[in-house]
Image (cartoon, grey):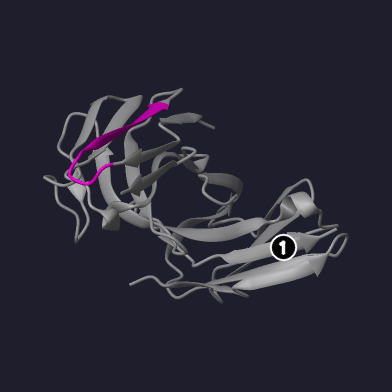
Amino acid sequence: KQEVTQIPAALSVPEGENLVLNCSFTDSAIYNLQWFRQDPGKGLTSLLLIQSSQREQTSGRLNASLDKSSGRSTLYIAASQPGDSATYLCAVIPASGSRLTFGEGTQLTVNP
Amino acid sequence: SAVISQKPSRDICQRGTSLTIQCQVDSQVTMMFWYRQQPGQSLTLIATANQGSEATYESGFVIDKFPISRPNLTFSTLTVSNMSPEDSSIYLCSARQENYGYTFGSGTRLTVV
């Protein structure tokens, strides 16, 4: 059974800092890995999708990496802003089937 | 990627009543999913809704409590039946697209009193 762990559970940083969120998974037989952002009481917004054959994806100030062999992904946020404050979730898409497995999330607070 | 419109965004309901949540996708998708997110927790899959067949429910969720419709490739509804305060959660629909991964609706924040 796939298990996804996110570290840290919560993170508070001053504005402008670069930061890294970590995601690890136990079963390397994945199809894709996807990072989401969730604001309180809202739905999920997709940030980056990494195909299993890719090593990283970039969008603006965000960069996500994937190392299947070690079962790890990182989300790098450059020059953080207060508007980045949210919960960040990583989710693993299995190689077979369609059932997403989510981590518990990292709650990020960026202080002005 | 697809855009999903979900409504209502929030509701406060009396116990014993039912609420139907709707999700409209702006393109055709084969697979749609319904999730529940209880306060402070991650998402739990309720069921997978495929067009033309009955929904597939996860362990702990039953059709009588959470009936789902999927009349076409762009629309699905989830009904929360005979509600109790324990059903107070955020409910989310999602769709999968091959090159875009998963897209989620904006969520329905349900409070049962």
- Residue A70, above or below B27: below
Q: Where residue B49 sits: x, y (%)?
A: 26, 39
Image quarter of the C terminus of chain A: bottom right
- Please give the name of the residue rendered at 65% of the width and 60% of the height, measured from the top-left corner: A55
Q: For mark 1, does the 10 Å Cα neighbourhood hold few (<14), some (14 to 19), or many (20 or more) residues? A: many
In the image: residue A76, left or right of residue A72: right
In the image: residue B58, left or right of residue A56: left
Along the line of sight, the residue nearer the viewer: B10 or A58: B10
- Residue B99, above or below A56: above
Q: Where residue A96 sits: x, y (%)?
A: 33, 56
- Please give the name of the residue rendered at 86% of the width and 60% of the height, measured from the top-left corner: A15
- Residue A50, above or below A71: above
Q: Where residue B33 sits: x, y (%)?
A: 33, 43
- Residue A58, above or below A15: above
The residue carrying mark 1 is A109
Along the line of sight, the residue nearer the viewer: B31 or A30: B31
- Please give the name of the residue rendered at 26% of the width and 36% of the height, measured from the top-left corner: B19
In the image: residue B50, left or right of residue B96: left
Hey, which quadrant is residue A82 in on the image?
bottom right
Taking the image as drawn, is residue A96 in sight? Answer: no
Taking the image as drawn, is residue A102 in sight? Answer: yes
Disc 1 element: strand
Residue extent of the magenta highlight: B14-24
Q: Is residue A46 magenta?
A: no
Subunit bearing disc 1:
A
